[in-house]
Image (cartoon, rainbow, N blue to C red):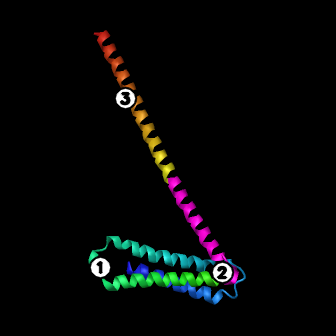
Amino acid sequence: MIAETLAGIALVKQSVDFIKSQINTAKDIGEITGAVEGLFRGQDEIEKARNKKAGVSVGDQLGIKTVAQEVIDAKLAAEAMQEMRNMIDMRFGPGTFKSILDLRSKKIKEQKEAEAEARRIQRRKEREAEETIRQAMIVGATIVCAVGLLVFLFVAVIK
């Protein structure tokens, strides 16, 4: 968990450094997109590490060092995000960073919806397969009973 937080902070710092060094020479936002995505991934990793603490003992969760580090990491990530927002908006025009955030949120939402739809389709296919097997078993049992009855009648008639 600590490694994930450290990786998240490192990713945020690396992205910020890259954007700072390239922002003035970038001709369009596409040239720094990877760094902006790295910034978002780093922030997500920090949040995931904070959310994973639910399974950790209360003593570990409430340790002053742990709590302080969580707060500091979250503040550093938020500060870096604000700094990048300002730099990108100043370079490419007001609202550019908000547009990026909106588009990212839209893509994440679409991906979650697509995954949910895929799960629904998979469940429907599984139910259909179960229903087909159930119907085949009923038909098979009916045929076995009918054949058994015919054999019983033939044997009874022959005797």
Kind of residue indicated by mark 2: Asp
Kind of residue indicated by mark 3: Ala
Q: Position of residue 118 (x, y in %)?
A: 52, 53
Quadrant that contains the N terminus: bottom left
Q: Which mark is residue 60?
A: 1
* Secondary structure at numbered mark 3: helix
Kind of residue indicated by mark 1: Asp
> Do the numbered discs 3 and 2 sit on residues whose CB atoms are within 8 Å?
no
Stretch of the chain drawn in magenta = 89-118
User: How far is mark 3 from mark 2, CA to CA?
Assistant: 72 Å
Q: Residue at x 50, y 55 (%)?
A: 116
- Label 3 or label 2, whichever lies nearer to me, is 2
Q: Residue at x 52, y 84 (%)?
A: 79
Quadrant that contains the C terminus: top left
Q: Which mark is residue 30?
A: none
Residue linked to disc 2: 89
Mark 3 Cα shell of 10 Å, populated few (<14), some (14-19), many (≥20):
few
Q: Is residue 94 magenta?
A: yes
